């Protein structure tokens, strides 16, 4: 009888549905002795897509300030359980669409939580292998809100604040966008309090194609594409951890696309006087100019195990130098410039040769300097046969006119200070998020 009554309600029009649901709600409320249900909730149940609402199911509306319109709970503390599971097979659909319509306040497009040490706060999957699909798509219109906020409460174990995956060769594991053009917004904000955890872990498992483990955009002039923070004060933590297993891949690829202005492809900073703003374990290659406001040194280890710094020699012009030795024959010697070294410098311009005799003689001088060789002679017509050493210094090819080039350090300092202030504002927002 009860089932047939619900079917009658479902077949009826909108008016019949509303009346039927009211009677049903009153019946359930009285039967279960639940108080204040009707005072806080309203809505209706639809067995199929409705021509007015365009939704298969419309859930209850909650008018209270501390509850949830829909609450999904997986009570088991172990196993591959889900508080809620959403799926879209459409090539242009969305697995999960969460929307916080309020334009102010600390709102969430979606808030997900898992207490299991091996669980997942959010598991979203777009199963279509082609098309512009989204495992999850989140919007937030508030300038203080968060598009996605993921938190793994467990302080130990391999937990994830959020886990995102895309199998498409042209897809994105994570796509985060902060649409506001002003304000200290985040394309994505991720946090992990465990001393062995990871703030962000993103994996693109396709072995071919131009895939991204994570892709972040920010349109704000004072925003940040990616902001990663490891709040633990101890342990080997990472603000961000990036890895690429491909033999031709890149662990981190950063690009400042603006063609003007003092931009940074990578900006690294440390507050510790003994730390490093950027640390590279392995070879480092710079295509372009290298500008250093401090010292440039090579670290050499001594026999007693200590390390010392040997400093680079700086010059007012762009010089390359080479060293060699030769021997006089009857007071003369023709020295050939190393052809490989000659390709790196411009010997058609004036170059310098410094001589050091390795024996007794009347003195040495240089003459007949050419692009490929120079001649060394003994002074006053001497006929010695001693050996000598030389140091050849020539202008680097393509940089012959460089001399004490001006550096606009003031603007660089302003950029650095501005970035520092932005980071401080970001930390303030981080503290605000802790309060809420």
Image: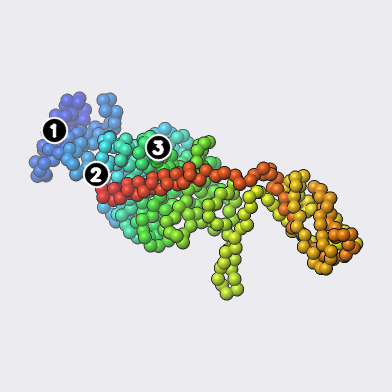
The reply to whether callout 2 and callout 1 are in contact (CB within 8 Å) is: no
Percent of width and height locating residue 140 = 32, 37
The reply to whether residue 55 is in sight is: yes
- Please, is residue 287 above or below residue 308 in the view? above
Query: Reading the chain from its start, which is encountered first: label 1 or label 3?
Result: 1
Q: Which residue is mark 1?
A: 22
Q: Nearer the viewer, residue 107 or 341?
A: 341
Measure the alpha-carbon separation of dots 3 and 2.
Answer: 35 Å
Q: Residue at x 30, y 45 (%)?
A: 111
- 169 left or right, relative to 53: right
Q: Nearer the viewer, residue 188 or 316?
A: 316
Observer-side mark, 1 or 3, equals 3
Q: Nearer the viewer, mark 3 or mark 2?
A: 3
Residue 153 horizontal/vertical position (percent): 31, 54
Q: Give x and y (percent) for residue 195.
A: 38, 60
Identified at 43% across, 34% down, the residue is: 91
Q: Position of residue 412 (x, y in %)?
A: 48, 45
Of labels 2 and 1, earlier in sequence is: 1
Identify the element where label 1 is drawn. helix
Q: Reading the chain from its start, which is encountered first: label 3 or label 2?
A: 2
Q: Which labelled disc corresponds to residue 71?
A: 2
| Disc 2 from disc 1: Cα separation | 21 Å
Judge by depth and name the residue closer to the eye, 237 or 324: 324
Decide: few, some or many residues near mark 2? Use Cα within 10 Å; few <14, some 14-19, many ≥20. few
Q: Is residue 397 left or right of residue 4?
A: right
Q: Nearer the viewer, mark 2 or mark 1?
A: 2
Query: Which residue has dot 3 on it?
Result: 220
Residue 48's image quarter?
top left
């Amino acid at each position: 009888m009860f089932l047939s009554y619900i079917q009658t309600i479902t077949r009826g029009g909108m008016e019949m549905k509303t009346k039927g649901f009211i009677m049903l709600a009153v019946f359930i409320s009285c039967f279960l002795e639940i108080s204040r249900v009707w005072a806080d909730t309203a809505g209706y149940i639809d067995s199929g897509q409705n021509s007015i609402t365009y939704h298969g199911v419309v859930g209850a509306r909650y008018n209270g300030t501390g509850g949830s319109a829909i609450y999904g709970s997986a009570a088991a503390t172990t196993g591959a359980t889900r508080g809620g599971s959403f799926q879209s097979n459409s090539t242009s659909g969305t697995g999960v669409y969460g929307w916080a319509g309020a334009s102010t306040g600390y709102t969430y497009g979606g808030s997900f939580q898992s207490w299991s040490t091996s669980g997942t706060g959010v598991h979203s999957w777009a199963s279509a292998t082609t098309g512009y699909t989204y495992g999850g798509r989140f919007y937030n219109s508030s300038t203080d809100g968060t598009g996605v906020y993921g938190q793994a409460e467990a302080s130990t174990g391999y937990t994830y604040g959020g886990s995102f995956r895309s199998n498409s060769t042209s897809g994105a594991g994570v796509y985060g966008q902060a649409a506001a053009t002003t304000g200290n917004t985040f394309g994505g904000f991720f946090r992990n309090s465990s001393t062995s955890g990871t703030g962000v872990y993103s994996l693109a498992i396709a072995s071919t194609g131009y895939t991204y483990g994570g892709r972040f955009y920010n349109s704000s002039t004072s925003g940040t594409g990616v902001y990663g923070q490891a709040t633990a004060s101890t342990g080997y933590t990472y603000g961000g951890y990036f890895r690429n297993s491909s033999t031709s891949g890149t662990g981190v690829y950063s690009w400042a696309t603006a063609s003007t202005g003092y931009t940074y492809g990578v900006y690294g900073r440390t507050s510790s006087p003994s730390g490093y703003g950027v640390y590279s374990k392995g070879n480092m290659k710079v295509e372009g100019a290298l500008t250093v406001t401090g010292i440039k040194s090579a670290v050499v280890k001594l026999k007693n195990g200590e390390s010392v710094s040997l400093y680079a020699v700086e010059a007012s012009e762009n010089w390359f130098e080479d060293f060699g030795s030769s021997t006089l024959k009857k007071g003369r010697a023709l020295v050939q410039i190393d052809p490989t070294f000659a390709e790196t410098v411009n010997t058609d311009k004036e170059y310098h040769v410094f001589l050091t005799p390795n024996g007794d003689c009347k003195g040495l001088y240089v003459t007949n300097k050419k692009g490929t060789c120079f001649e060394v002679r003994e002074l006053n017509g001497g006929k010695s046969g001693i050996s000598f050493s030389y140091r050849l210094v020539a202008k680097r090819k393509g940089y012959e006119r460089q001399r004490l080039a001006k550096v606009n350090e003031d603007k660089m300092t302003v950029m650095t200070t501005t970035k520092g202030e932005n980071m401080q504002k970001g930390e303030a927002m981080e503290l605000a998020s802790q309060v809420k």
